[in-house]
Image (cartoon, rainbow, N blue to C red):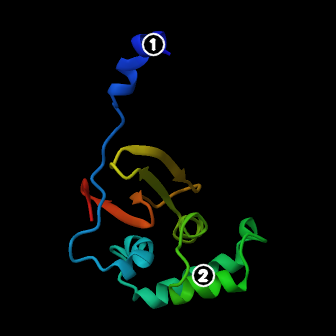
Amino acid sequence: MELWNQQYRNLADTDDREQLDVSAPRWYLLDDRVLSLFCCLLHGIGTPLNEYVAELTSYMETLRDLDGLFDAGYMAGIRDGTEKPGELELYAASQMHRWTIEVSTVDTTNKLVSKFSYTVDDSTKTVCLDRSGSYFAVKVDGYAI
């Protein structure tokens, strides 16, 4: 073990992963974290939140790619805010809006853990999201809001 420490200790001490500052503002209510993904997707659209959630979940029910991945209870939970939205909703939003959605996920120290893109043919725009746990932030002009 000592030999390993001598050879690889420098790798354990350095962490060159990208660091993103993703944290809820002080005024952000914890109950609203469930809705943060929808708020990010709505940025710049102008649709009321409840209408957007209803429209997106209705669209999800028509997507063949999502057949068998959720049930009526899950959809009801998304609509009433008791289920946390995530990958299924991101995929559906990318299809519905014809957007490429890039998601950067960070750990509890805001170090980049993964990057993933939901892509569509003939994308109309690219939406960049940062994710920390269940909290999402959208990047606008280089700032996570």
Q: Which mark is residue 57?
A: 2
- Mark 2 is on which residue type? Thr
Residue at image position (39%, 75%) is: 33
Q: Nearer the viewer, mark 2 or mark 1?
A: 1
Image coords of residue 109 (percent x, y): 33, 48
**Residue bearing the label numbered 1:** 2
Q: Quadrant of residue 138?
A: bottom left
Q: Is residue 128 visible?
A: no
Q: Nearer the viewer, residue 73 or 41?
A: 73
- Judge left or right: residue 42 versus residue 78: left
Q: Quadrant of residue 92?
A: bottom right
Q: Residues within 10 Å of mark 1 (few under 14, many from 20)?
A: few
Q: Quarter of the image containing the C terminus?
A: bottom left
Residue at image position (44%, 61%) is: 133
* N-terminal label among 2 and 1: 1
Q: Which mark is residue 80?
A: none
Q: Is residue 115 above or below residue 45?
A: above
User: In terms of secondary structure, where does tag 1 sit?
Assistant: helix
Residue at the right extreme of this rendering:
68
- Mark 1 is on which residue type? Glu
Q: Residues within 10 Å of mark 2 (few under 14, many from 20)?
A: some
User: In terms of secondary structure, where does tag 2 sit?
Assistant: helix
Residue at image position (39%, 65%) is: 136
Residue at image position (59%, 55%) is: 121
Q: Is residue 26 above or below residue 140?
A: below
Image coords of residue 29 (percent x, y): 30, 80
- Judge left or right: residue 23 versus residue 124: left
Q: Nearer the viewer, residue 125 or 53?
A: 53
Image coords of residue 98 (percent x, y): 53, 64
Image coords of residue 114 (percent x, y): 48, 45
Residue at the front extreme of this rendering:
2
The answer to whether the residues at label 2 and label 1 have Cβ atoms under 8 Å apart is: no
